Every structure is written in structure tokens, then in C-alpha cells.
Amino acid sequence: MAVEAGTCVLPPVRVVLADDEPLLRAGLRTVLEARGTVRVVGEANDGDGLLAAVDRHRPDVVLADVQMPGTDGLAALRVLCARPDAPPAAVLTTFDLDDYVTEALRIGVQGFLLKDAEPESLVRAVRDLAAGGAVLDPRITARLLPRLAAGLPAPGRPPPALTLRENQVLCRVAAGKSNAVIARELSLAEATVKKYVSALLVKLGVENRVQAALLARSWRTE
């Protein structure tokens, strides 16, 4: 089922979901598919199954637990994120897995979500990921920001000199907004926003927009 957005009809975001608890997967599938904006096209109960499901279904977004038997989710995401055509991926985690979140950031995961997230927040996060946004649950960010920022380049340094437009783009990246949303809010072409984001990554000395968002948030808290 497609979903109308203004005058456009958007297809549902196709998701592969990996978790070793069948009941949790069933609950997440129900939540994600409730409004017709997301469709779970594949499921897995371990890391090997996750990679196989991604190869089979070519999803728009991957949601994965990190603790699974055999090849765990983190090992699978490390392989997945190294691929040039990898779909955006988010970790489904709990508060007691700080080390996993830190490692997931390092390997290039674009989102961090808690398993008890509100249904609307979870659906919105999936759609934001599909649109190129970075998704950071505020509770994870507040708890782990000092630790995550410590793994970024010189987190205690003063922010680099940015132009007004670069600051506008960075603030929106830090809020987890996608390129499409940023382009609409700033009345820019999406391709122009992509160029700004690429330039910001170089200027900030980070590898991806999640790291850029966390670095920007660390400056705000100093």
C-alpha cells in the first residue's frame, strides 16, 4: 500500500528486521506496518540471516539488534556498512549496551533506537533513515554523548569557523533531519544540501552525519 504525501504517492519503506526474539520481532513488525508507511520485507534471528535477508530483499532500511546468537548483529553490521551500496542501518538497543553503541557509531551505523521507543517515533525514525537522515534517540544521546564524543576527532576543541549556511545545515543534521527536509526548510536544492553535508564532514573531520551530529551536540553542551 502506498501512502500519500501532499500530491505525491510514496511507496512504503522496505525494512529488514533482525532480532533473535520472535515475539519482539512480531511486535516490531506490527508497529512498523500499522500505518502502511513501512513494510517489513525480511526477518532474521542472527547476523548471518541478516546479511542473507539484505542480499535477498535489497531493503531501504535495516533494523538490527546487536546481541544475537552465532554471528551477532554488530559483526553483521560491520560487514554490511563496509559495502558501497549498503542501505542505512539502525541499531535496536537497550540502556545496558553502551559498548555496542560506541562500536556501532565507529563502523558507520546511521541510527540508534531504543526497543521501547514510542510507535510513532519508531516509524518516523525508519522513514527518516530511508530519506538519508541520522536517527539518535534523545535518551541514548543524553546518556552516551560524553563517551561517544570522546571517540570523535578532538571533541574538546572549539568549533571550526563555519559560514551561516553551513551552521544552518549542521544544526539540522544535528537534529537528525534528512537532506530532503533540510532542503525544504532552507529553500535549497537537495543536491546543494548534499554538497554542504559532504563539505561539513571534511571540515569537522568526521566520517558520517551521525558523527557530525554528535560532535555538534557535544559543542552545545560545553
Image (cartoon, helix red, strand yellow):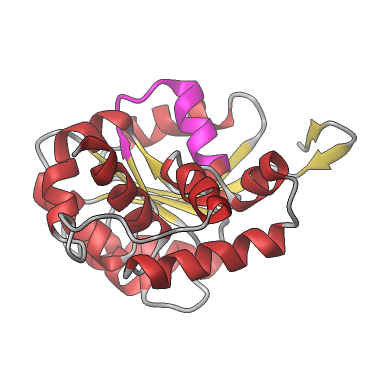
Rendered residue at 70%/57% (across/down) = 190
Determine whether 167 is above or below 27 in the image.
Answer: below
Q: Is residue 3 above or below residue 155?
A: above
User: Which quarter of the figure is the C terminus placed in?
Assistant: top left
Q: Which contiguous range is marked in magenta? A: 113-127
Residue ID at (24%, 58%): 104
| Left-right relation of 222 to 207 | left
Image x and y of residue 159, in percent: 30, 55
Judge from the rendering whether residue 121 lies leftward or rightward of residue 50; answer left or right.
Answer: right
Q: Main secondary structure of the magenta part?
A: helix
Dividing the picture into quadrants, the one containing residue 57 is: bottom right
Q: Residue 89: x and y, percent? A: 41, 55
Where in the figure is residue 84, as x and y percent of width and height?
48, 79
Residue 68 in sight: no
> Is residue 178 toward the left or the right of residue 155 in the image?
right
Report the residue at 55% width, 43% height from top: 128
- Please name the residue shown 51% across and 53% down the image: 61
Q: Is residue 58 magenta?
A: no
**Residue 116 located within the stretch drawn in magenta:** yes
Q: x, y (%) of residue 107?
A: 27, 67
Closer to the camera, 29 or 10?
Answer: 10
In the figure, residue 146 lies in which quadrant?
top left
Count of picture labels: 0
**Residue nearer the viewer, 59 or 99:** 99
